Amino acid sequence: MKKMQRRKTMDSRETLLEVKNIKKYFKGHARGKPVKAVDDVSFSIARGETLGLVGESGCGKSTLGRTVLNLIRATEGQVLYAGKDLTKLPEHEMRQMRQKLQMVFQNPYSSLNPRMTVLEAVRAPLDIFNIGTKEERFERSREILKYVGMDEYQIYRYPHEFSGGQRQRIVIARAIISSPDFVVCDEPVSALDVSVRAQVLNLMQDIQRERGVAYLFISHDLSVVKHISDRIAVMYLGKIVELATRDELYENPKHPYTQALLSAIPIPDADVQKERILLKGDLPSPMDPPKGCVFHTRCPFAGERCRTQAPDFRNISDGHGVACHLCEEGTT
Ligand code: SF4
């Protein structure tokens, strides 16, 4: 019942941003072949929603996040937001749009200018977008720093005087000060001690509840993604191979790669035994991706068809999409 209610609330939300068949290819060094970092990815995000994006290092998650925000130009495809395709916007229009589209990077140590006080760093977006008077910017910066847990006496200090968790709070304050609709969070808690991760995640959830911001939350850590996401997309070698609501994905994973990832999550209860699915080999090079299904070189269920024919991404139930031949054949 609770699950159905949750689904209903999700369905009734207004679509905020739509990514359509986005590709990001980089020039390769060897034999002129492009590196297919992101290869034909589509999804949408609703206002106030968190879409988790998981996958191994090197699968294209961060490149996808940057491409969606047009920090790097897409090779092909569309990113529709506020009636415009971001991939086609000229730089001066995109600059104005950035007020509503922000990013939080993984490393809070390199994200802050060491020569700026915390107050100056957080106020910077207001200065750039010319929001409010000088006094209003100062007041708003103070308020937002207080909101993320900074004391008044700390706001004139420099980044090196803070811990990793505090710095990430400052980075989050800077990201939300211009009241964005959408924030791409690229491994925002990976560099933090386990003890402060939950605090930062809870802060992000509070911000979302109160301000209605949507997140694309990128992480290689499925426990973290489970904590914060409404829906989750699983990425492998530049493609989304499964996308579902959080509960559906954890309770009913369909793609063999998702099943392997979930089987690797440690269970806190020592009495509960779980069979771990071990994947063979490493992630193949995106410069020379396998033919057919890109996962076939590591998939325990790969058949002849998988080696020659790429599976389409298709919905197997309401809001649950998978790219695997087994799902088409109804054998999972
Ligand atoms: Fe495995 Fe084939 Fe499904 Fe790819 S299409 S995940 S190789 S079973």
Image (cartoon, grey):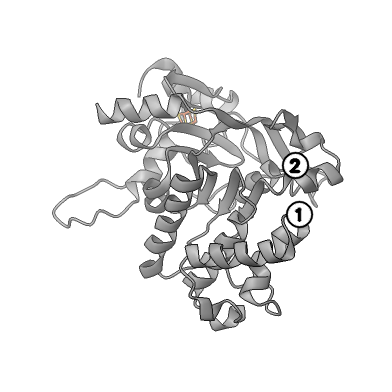
Q: Are marks 2 and 1 in contact (CB under 8 Å)?
A: no
Vertical order, 101 against 244 (above or below): below
Looking at the image, is mark 2 or mark 1 earlier in the sequence?
Answer: 2
In the rendered image, residue 326, in percent from the top left (x then y), is placed at 42, 23
Helix, strand or loop status at disc 1? loop
Badge 1, how many Cα within 10 Å: few under 14, some, many 20+? some
- Mark drawn on residue 57: none
Q: Quadrant of the C terminus?
A: top left
Q: Is ligand 1 within 8 Å of the beta carbon of the residue shown at mark 2? A: no
Vertical order, 29 against 45 (above or below): below
In the rendered image, residue 102, in percent from the top left (x then y), is placed at 64, 51
Residue occupying the point 66% across, 46% down? 101
Q: Which residue is mark 2?
A: 25
Badge 2, how many Cα within 10 Å: few under 14, some, many 20+? many
Residue occupying the point 60% across, 59% down? 105
Residue occupying the point 52% across, 48% down? 217
Q: Mark 2: which amino acid? A: Tyr
Residue occupying the point 31% across, 25% down? 4
Q: Mark 1: which amino acid? A: Phe
Q: Which residue is mark 1?
A: 129
Residue 69 shown left or right of residue 108 in the figure: right
**Alpha carbons under labels 2 and 1: distance apart:** 31 Å
